[in-house]
Amino acid sequence: MAASRLTSLLAHPHLIDAIVPAPPDLARRLADRLRAGGLDSDLAAEIGLQSELRWAGRAKYGPAATRMLYTRNGLEQGTRLAVAAHHARRFREAGCTSVADLGCGLGVDSLALAGLGLRVIAIERDPDTAACARHNLAAFPEVSVLEADVTAIDIEALGAEGYFADPARREGSTRLSHPNQWSPPLDTVLSWSRLGPLGVKLAPGIAYEMLPADSETQWVSVDGEVVEATVWCGDLAAQPARSALVIRGDRAHAWTIEGDPSAPPLLADPAADLGEYLFEPDGALIRAGGVAHLAERLHAHPVYPRVAYLTGDAPLPASCAVFAKAWRVLDVVSLKTKKLKAAMRAWDAGAVTIKKRGVDVSPENLRRRIVYPKGEQAVTLICTRVGSRHVAVRVEEVPPATA
């Protein structure tokens, strides 16, 4: 079998060290210049690809991105380094000294585990991805990377005290929606909990009924973006629960909702009308089924059943500031185009930000219909339902109350 482009690059470590992160257009130009200068065409193309992926990887891996090697799928599915650090901390706090990383991808979770001094056995079936993992983990001799299919080996024979699995959720460019289409299937992966403490990375949209009743499942957001859910079994779960981990910069905050994670979430009664404030819960808390719990804390109510905007008359307390964004309600207008156009003129609207939940509206199309680029005022609109009404709410963001 012919060597892959990545294998050819690995034979030239001096070239790997010289690859500079660049946006896609510049990365392609770099590959073209290398090719024009006489470098092998496949090798030039791989250098261009790694340059592009190192550029894209900075959002997940920070400065470490400029030294790593990637596959495109591995980068897309890989754990963010800040999140991997929280995964690794769970294993250490559970008393594990060795972890099998089953489906290690580019090796980022293994990197975080090894950084805490744990011995790691990393398994990856794709040859190029395994080669990337070996390169990315070369500084840690306590990590071994094996190229193998985790469904075809004796996992118990690895001798690990804990297990972390990240089943593949894509087949080529196709996203596999049902967990039992994943590779390995989720049912298979969860069965490994009989071997010891187990963590399994999931798609954030996982259905509650797929979750083990005795686990903790935690949804994670990073700077406002929901990036994953992880189910923790055995000693890695403090109690059966759903939880949200909200990471902002270098700080992390958790909200735990005790109880069977496979049970339907608690629902709050909707508001009769808008209050002085609108609140948007963080996406991780929404996915964890925590909207009603936040509503109780804020003395607020959903604007409409199952719509994750809350409204109330009390400002956002400092204790909830990382779990929700708050706006002051300024005006409420019908979502009909004619009324919105008139309101835009009255507000002297120029730049307009449109958010929406619970209504069938395209923010881009709505903006084209209602905005004339003549105004000078920045306007934020939240399009949603309140009772039987479809409304656009003009708001201004307000800081949380001080503690």
Image (cartoon, rainbow, N blue to C red):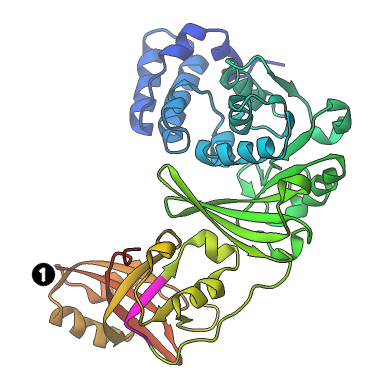
Q: Which residue is mark 1?
A: 374
The number of discs equals 1
The residue positioned 20% from the left and 83% from the top of the image is 343
Residue 336 location in percent, x, y? 32, 86
Give the x, y percent position of residue 294: 50, 71
Above or below, 199 relative to 12: below
Q: Amino acid at mark 1?
A: Lys
Q: Quadrant of the N terminus?
A: top right
Report x, y in % for residue 340. 25, 83
275 inside magenta stretch: yes
User: Does residue 376 appear left or right of residue 175 in this picture?
Assistant: left
When the figure is inspected, residue 55 is found, relative to residue 288, above or below; the finding is above
Neighbour tally class for label 1: few under 14, some 14-19, many 20 plus, Cα within 10 Å? few
Q: Tell me what residue is drawn at x 78 percent, y 48 percent.
A: 234
Q: Quadrant of residue 375?
A: bottom left
* Span highlighted in magenta in the image: 274-279
Position in image of residue 236 (x %, y %): 72, 45
Q: Is residue 305 magenta?
A: no
Question: What residue do we see at 36% from left, 32% from top?
Answer: 23
Label 1 secondary element: loop
Instruction: Say above or below: 244 vs 108.
Output: below
